[in-house]
Amino acid sequence: MRHLYTFQLIEAVARAGSIRKAAEDMNLTASALTRRVQRFEQEFGAQLFERLPKGVRLNPAGELLLHHYRASLSDLARVQSQVADLAGERRGHVSIACSQAMVPYFLPEQIARYRRDHPGVTFSVNVRDRTQAEQELVSYSSDLALVFEPVYLVDFEVLHVIPQEVFAVMASDHPLAKKAEVRLRDCLDVPHVAPTTKYGVRHLLDFAARRGSRRVSPAVETESFDLIRHYVLCEKLIGFQIPLGLREQDDGSLVFKPISSKDLPPGNLILGQMRGRTLPVASARFALQLATALKDYHSARIGN
């Protein structure tokens, strides 16, 4: 839509941090982009960027304007999806920020299930840590967040919660694989691979270890839970993950065991959105589907 083009240019400059780089991204000359931004600033009555020696960045007025633009896009998407519903034709786009544990199994199955009924809906899946996921909601970069142990910013509205234990992940021939109960000290007394401190699993591990006058001292520390699952087969280390991110291997090479709740109480996997925001129809209905799936998953685990 042409009346939004200037805002797209401003967002491109903010993202690139440079007029020249933004002009390349938007297939314009730097002089044409500069004139477009300056003309808008004159009409708007305020400058939007702080000029730096090696580029530009948004000033407070620019940040307010960009927030307004993203909110307007969200409202427009919601109206478009409502109009599509009136025509009996479900379209739209769903963006979700999620913990890595959701990527291998849970979210692909849920997205495929939704798109079987509504193939006109597209998705963006943004893998984020627990702080970044909430920031994505505030900036309108994501409609939904599905994260383990979020930090709970003031703008986070909880839609559904299920508890998740932290599991020890190990090769099937690891000595701990045969233990009836895995204690946290068992895991910390042997070499282990752990996520970095910005992830919810590590937050719980560190808190529980300190309570027992211990510490998490990983031989390998990583931002990738996929690496954790694979590395425990390479060096027979102990890894950590929540059960929703795990699946039994056909060859039986991996074993997953919950760490005793005596040492490490379950954390919370939380589905949320930005407080007070009215989601586009597709996002709102996908949120309902996720909430139902999480509830069913939790009920099935309790039943077992």
Image (tube, rainbow, N blue to C red):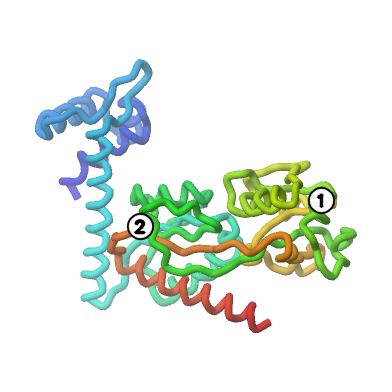
Helix, strand or loop under label 2: strand
In space, the residues marked 1 and 2 are separated at their CA atoms by 39 Å
Which residue is at the front of the view, 260 or 244?
A: 260
**Residue 154 horizontal/vertical position (percent):** 38, 52
Identify whether 232 is placed above or below 257.
above
Along the polypeptide, which appears first: circle 1 or circle 2?
Answer: 1
Residue 174 horizontal side relative to residue 63, left or right: right
Quadrant in the picture for residue 13: top left
**Residue 298 horizontal/vertical position (percent):** 58, 76
Residue 98 horizontal side relative to residue 200, left or right: left
Amino acid at the residue labelled 2 = Met
Residue 280 horizontal side relative to residue 238, left or right: left
Say the numbered circle drawn on residue 130. Answer: none
Residue 243 horizontal side relative to residue 61, left or right: right
Count of labels shown? 2
Tell me, yes or no, whether the two marked residues, 1 and 2, touch with CB atoms within 8 Å: no
